[in-house]
Image (spheres, helix red, strand yellow):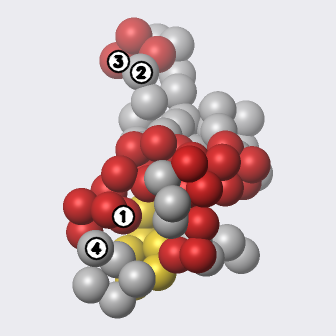
Amino acid sequence: MDTAILFAGAPRFPVIFDGAPLVLDSAQAAEAAKILGARRVVPVHYDSWAHFTEGREDLVAAFTAAGLADRLQLA
């Protein structure tokens, strides 16, 4: 796979799903990139709203820890 567009940011609402993330957190996004074998990963919907609990720094840290920092394409 050339490019994976992943919803990240771990948005949470306390009243929905017991506060569990509605989409991927940063570690899950890195794992998804590995599973998909994506050469490039473009995370979307990870900033600009109060319900996002992880942002750019979390994504960079997770992808770096997974050895995938070179695949992360942040806007």
Q: Nearer the viewer, mark 3 or mark 1?
A: 1
Element under disc 3: helix
Res 53 → quadrant: top right
Badge 3 or badge 4: first in the primary sequence: 3
Amino acid at circle 2: Ala
The residue under the point 71% across, 76% down is 75
Q: Which residue is mark 2?
A: 20
Residue 56 visible in rendering: yes
Q: Nearer the viewer, mark 3 or mark 2?
A: 2
Q: Residue 20: image x %, image y %? A: 41, 21
The CA distance from mark 3 to mark 2 is: 6 Å
Q: Nearer the viewer, mark 2 or mark 1?
A: 1
Amino acid at circle 3: Phe
The CA distance from mark 3 to mark 1 is: 25 Å
Q: Residue 15: image x %, image y %? A: 46, 12
The residue under the point 27% across, 84% down is 1
Q: Residue 5: image x %, image y %? A: 42, 72
The CA distance from mark 2 to mark 4 is: 26 Å
Q: Residue 13: image x %, image y %? A: 52, 22
Q: Which mark is residue 37?
A: 4
How many C-alpha atoms fall within 10 Å of the one at disc 4: few (<14), some, or many (≥20)? some
Depicted 71 relative to depicted 30: above or below: below
Q: Which residue is mark 3?
A: 17
